[in-house]
Amino acid sequence: MFTAAPAPQTHYDEQPEQILIVDDDVVCVRALHAVLADLGNVAFTTQASDAVRLAKQLQPNVVLLDISMPERDGYQLCTDLKSCVETQDAAVIFITSNDGFEQELKAFEVGAADFLPKPFNPQLVKARVQVQLALRRERRRLLSTQRDLDHVVRNVPGHITFWNSDLMCQLCSDHEGRWFGVSSGNCRGKPVVDVLGEHVARIVRPLLSALLRNAGGEGTVAAEESLALTRVGADGRKRHLHASMALRMDAQNRWGALLLLTDVTAVNAAEAALGEERARAQVILGAIGDSVIATDASGRVTYMNPVAETMTEWEANDALGRPIETVMPLFSHDELAPLQNPVHIALRQQRKVGMALDTVLVTRSGNRVNVEDSASPIKDAEDQISGAVIVFHDVSEAHAMAIKMTHLAQHDQLTDLPNRLLLADRISQAMRSASAGHGSLALMILDLDHFKFVNDAHGHPVGDLILRTVANRLTTIFSANATVSRQGGDEFMILLPEIHSPEQARLMALAAIDAVSSTILIEGTDFHIGCSVGISVYPDDALTREDLMRHADSALYRAKSDGRNRCSFHSASIEEMLVQRSRTGRTLRAAIDAARVEVHYQPQVEVLSQRVDTVEALVRLRDEAGALIPPSEFIEYAEETGLIVALGRAVLLDAFKRISDARAVGYNLHVAINVSIVQFAQPDYLESLCELCAAHGVEPASIELEITEGLLMKDADNLRLLLERLRKHGFRIALDDFGTGYSSLAYLSQLPIDVLKIDKSFVSRLATSQQCVSIATAIIQLGKSLHMGLIAEGVETQEQADQLLDMGCTTMQGYFYSRPMPAHALVAWLQQRNVIRTGV
């Protein structure tokens, strides 16, 4: 069965399909209406007398007509419909119980399109109607296409004719006879000379004959030939024509020739005028002093004037068609990094574009020329981009002079160091950068002690040589990103745009004092010049450039007042902090060197079973009086100075001893150890860790390495690779203080993490903060969904423990279960706890 889907509506079929049912059987009408309702608008009547009137009103596409009806039979109704202009195109489908051959034959004689017997099959009826609707739509489409084609032929700006193999005209588009005085109605069957006139026919006829003689060869489908000719119009003016010919089959399936004549008089005139304009433009472009290069829309060279040839060292003939980057390669002046040619920017953004500052053109032979100017897009008559033009000139001399003038304006003439003007600009830039990155910077003022006496005793020439020597020494000891400047006299300023701590600035200041204080030999005489340094730190001491410089100056005054040849900070609190850090550093080094680093251990309790399989190693440091120093005071210092590597090794070795001691009394103990980014950064960290485990007989599975979220996000990709290698060797990985950082959950799922530790800041506020409850719950659910272990830190009350158990976290660590205990007490605590837990 064939079912034709309704055709989509188009410009020639915008109205919905109209279907008319004519049958005196109401039951039959209802059944047909139900079958055809989704094919279009369905109307019906049970009165034969009303059928023609309703059909004229609706102009249906399909009429379903019963043959046996009172008043008038279906045959007569069909005849009436076919004789009416409004309804003659409707497809009539007879539906009748009289299904004999004679009835069916008579139905087709009166114009029916189809014949269906009663009782009817609904699917068959729908399929037949769909076919008729599809046929009507296709007929309308063909009629519309024919009208469109006729409209195109009538309005094409040319003269179209079709000639048969005898060169007799079969078709002409010139209905009014405007071209040759012969209308299309008078052209059919006439020879070439009668249609086109003697002058045009004399040129065209031999070409048409030659074209037709070549027709019919193997593989021949069409051939074309064109030429230019002229004719004299009715107004006496000479017109230029262009003729194009092609082979086409006629209605009898024989070869014929299609001829198109177009009037190109205006085009030829425009081309002539354009040629004159191009010649004039060539003269102008050749006479100007700037280089000019034009390209097409893809950036390939289409024109170069003589100046551009000289500057690029490319001849125009050799450059044509090459990419603009090949002919005109541009680079930045300082780094000689490739620059995008402005031509491409002008083409892409459709606007005038200036070159980047300090642009260098590298010529074909490799010479470097400073250039500047601009590129602009070229648009055609339809406002479409057709290419671009770039105009440029040599600015090497001007550039060199500008560099020299800028340098003189920003540098000290004696030492060639940046002067106050340039330093002020760099301070402002450094403050903006530090503010954006929440960093710090330091400004130092260095003043030579008693330099006036040297000048007075030995003269200014000697003093100038000493100042140059000091400048050279300062620029040597400070890094490239620092700015060493001379402010005048014997005063220097040093800007450190990035410092990790005030301690870094203090160490650099001491290095500057040592460098300046070394003996200076001038013309056989030794000079010993001391200096004092004042230091101001942003943002601790000042938030503006002026305050930063003023505070550094006051710190310099303080240094001189304290005895000279020293450095001083503006802030007394910073001074005290640095002293304390220095004291802590000495204590830490001494503890490491003497193997006096203490390690305390805090158990991690599996609450439901009360098992303790893992303890966390916590490093401790005591001052000279024996008091414990908070880890926050010495861990950061150890990381900054690199002592964290030795400190971590000491903790690891102590952990090995505790694991061995526990094993000796029957405990399979695991130790969790905090690891710093500095330790991970060691190139041999994994190898060293494995060697230590092997040397002390400890399985890697007994060691759990704890990292923080902050460490996780600093170098995530490299860290992931290292963690995967650690896991392959058997080490467990825990993520400490989870929830306090900003790690990506999507990335977390890809990391080899075994354990999540809920930070104690959330645990401590479970009873008072619903937000902390929500965060802790989310962490627990996340850990379970990622199949990670969970540990809650900082549990101090039974209420907290119960609440965490209800959330699903069963492993806890905190004062509620045990405070961190000295290493020597760990095994005894484990044994005692086991006795209590088992009731032995």
Image: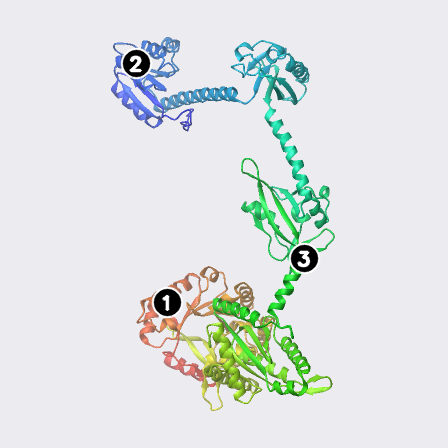
What's the distance in space between the residues labelled 1 and 2, CA to CA? 82 Å
Q: Residues within 10 Å of mark 1 (few under 14, many from 20)?
A: many
Q: Which mark is residue 776?
A: 1
Amino acid type, callout 1: Ala
- Contact check, label 1 and label 2, Cβ < 8 Å: no
Task: Please tell me in which quadrant of the rendered image residue 415 appears.
Answer: bottom right
Residue positioned most to the bottom: 625
Q: Position of residue 6 (x, y in %)?
A: 40, 27
Q: Nearer the viewer, mark 2 or mark 3?
A: 3
Q: Is residue 609 left or right of residue 459?
A: left
Task: Please tell me in which quadrant of the rendered image residue 274 appears.
Answer: top right
Q: Which mark is residue 52?
A: 2
Q: Secondary structure at mark 2?
A: helix
The quadrant of the image that shows the C terminus is bottom left
Identify the residue shown where x is 60% and y is 20%: 261
> Mark 2 or mark 1, which is nearer the start of the sequence?
2
Amino acid type, callout 3: Ser
What's the distance in space between the residues labelled 2 and 3, CA to CA? 94 Å
Q: Which mark is residue 433?
A: none
Q: Position of residue 410 (x, y in %)?
A: 60, 69
Q: Residues within 10 Å of mark 2 (few under 14, many from 20)?
A: some
Q: Secondary structure at mark 3?
A: helix
Amino acid type, callout 2: Val
562 in relation to 162, above or below: below
Q: Position of residue 452 (x, y in %)?
A: 61, 85
Q: Is residue 505 left or right of residue 284?
A: left
Q: Which mark is residue 396?
A: 3
